[in-house]
Amino acid sequence: MKISTSQVVEFLEGQRFICAQCIAKKGTRYHLLTHLGREINLASSRFIHVSARQLSAKARDIRVKKLHEIYASREALKEKINIPELWELVQDEQALWPPGKLAELAFDQTVVGPDHEAAFIRAVIDDHTYFKFREGMIKVQSPEAVKRILDQRAREAERFARLIRGSQWLEDLWSDNSLKKTGAIKELDDPDISFWISNIKNFCINGDESEQAVLVRELFRQAGITSLTAPFNTLIKAKIWAEEENLELLRYEINTEFSKAVVQQAEALAEFPVDAKKEAREDLTGLQTFTIDGPESQDLDDALSFRKVNNKWEIGIHITDIGLQVERNTPLFEEALQRGTTIYLPDRKISMLPEILSQKAWSLEMGSDRRALSFFIYLDPKGNILYQQIVRSVINIKERLTYETAEARITKGHLFHTLYELCVARQTRRIEDGALPLPIPELVIQVDETGEVEVELSHPGPGRFLIAECMILANLVAAQFVKNHSIPALYRSQPPPRDRIISGNETDLLANFRQRRLISKGNLGTEPDIHHGLGLDVYTTITSPLRRGLDLLMQQQITHMLAEGKPLHAKEDLIKFAIYLQQGLNTAAAVRQARVRYWLLKHMEKRKGEPLDAWILDTGRNKLLAVLSDYLLTVELPLIPGQRYSWDQLVKVQIKKVNARENILKMDWRH
């Protein structure tokens, strides 16, 4: 295209149309004077319209004025063009048109000037729906393309309106004006506000993985609220969430309530009476049975008895027998498999079974007849197993003991002391076979109704040890029973530790903590294998059917074998069930780990700046790993240039920054 000086051209600068006069040509570029009074150099490929009109070489200000008049004339002509109407007229004709031809139709006249043509190009570019301007020609959009663009534009308009509506609502909710805040809370049922509430929730739960993460961030930017915790605090201000809302439960979609079908089944089972004769159970209601648990425990699924029989010590481990009550393919059975376990959190408990069963009808309450699966293990004075038997029974608990009251009885001359000594002998045998008990204090977190957090380390006493060892013994006998009778089962096993740095009877906390980091992950499978952590050649769990899905399944296998002479579940079924169980266990572990950390950080928020004791766990190139003595929590510390550190070295540290809601904990040295 040959363009002479003084000719009028038009180009786009950003989203703005610019009229200009060619003053001179410099190589491949043209020197232009624009209607805004600026002079620029531009390639001809940038021109969207070239007019044959030339401006006379008058004074500069007169030429700028004339260019401005041309610009204004074209803008006025553009406003007269009805683009949708013209598209309706030509959509079924040719696909490409010269701008001048369509300008003739748009202005309904056979002869159009350069301003009409330029005005039409402007209208097409502004509209960018029905026509497209490409390389000097006008392309007619197909009806499908037009519909797609219009639909998208409608969605964008709706989105923008919703964004403005939502940002105003946010501003009112966060306002210091109580009337505005009250008004904002009253609007929660409004569809637009419900839309934002739903997406803010999803963003809080899933973060960047939320489908509307970008949109939610844009909402808060629009409202001028930039805090990282603003989305969460918005839901608190709206009285939708509490300050201590457990996002992990929402993130993992954990049901905290039971369905109507599960509740109805549980209520029916709770009314089912015990009939020892009808169910062919051995009546052990006269046996001196007792439970040992914490004073707050309500789901009591194990009890003990202990006596001397024919110069042999008989340990009775009695597990509440619920297996055949929970029939396969019923809502209660499927719910237990899905949940996999009861989840114990510092501030709440999420039961595997409805509490009408787990804390009442099936719990081993003192003075009530209960179905039980009773394991009788006969030991010599050295703790060797002489023989064992498993019976379906009815028991009646005679005493409910706490760990403290049980420990008070573990004195020389008392029957409990003999039971304790036998448990010590059993553990010694397991340690000789490679067991690693790792007696590390338990972190106990208590949260009261006001949200106050108390944290302490509880050292396991003789009472807890006694119960733990008896449960390991019953689980061993159960595993041996299903293995010896070729009953399909799910076994727990554990490979050897990645490295063994202590003997099993080590009592030093630092050494045990370091060894715990080296133990291998346990497995759940249908084939018996060694459990190196317990020092046993075969192992399963059966002692907590109220709280663990695996224990419920294994109890069903054994009780059905005892009652019917065959197992209830085939191996293929157990493989399928194991998948559900493992998912439930993994989810429960993740939720518990996150919630324990949350409450720990809440407790630590009160201790910012205090001196804390720690010990060095590991050294790296750029950081140290240390363990806080009060919490047994592993933290990172910065390296101090020139300073030397050694494993297990005791040090003083302090909290530099901590925020429970944002999961932030930064430590520094105490100087």
Image (cartoon, rainbow, N blue to C red):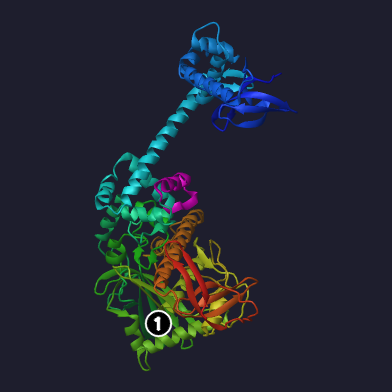
| Image position of 497 with respect to 234: above or below | below
- Is the residue 321 above or below the residue 440 in the image? above
Left or right: where does residue 140 sit relative to residue 392?
Answer: right
Does the magenta run of residues contain 222? yes
The answer to whether 334 appears left or right of 50 in the picture is: left
| Of 592 and 261, the residue lying toward us | 592
Q: Residue at x 53, y 19 (%)?
A: 119
Res. 383 visible in picture: no
- Residue extending farthest front: 59
Which one is nearer the viewer's eye here, 182 or 571? Answer: 182
Name of the residue lying farthest toward the right: 27
Q: Quadrant of residue 407?
A: bottom left
At label 1, counting other C-alpha atoms closer than 10 Å, the crowd grade (few under 14, some 14-19, many 20 or more) is many
Label 1 amino acid?
A: Glu
* Prevalent SS, magenta region: helix
- At mark 1, the secondary structure is strand
Region rendered in magenta: 204-224
Q: Is residue 434 above or below residue 100?
A: below
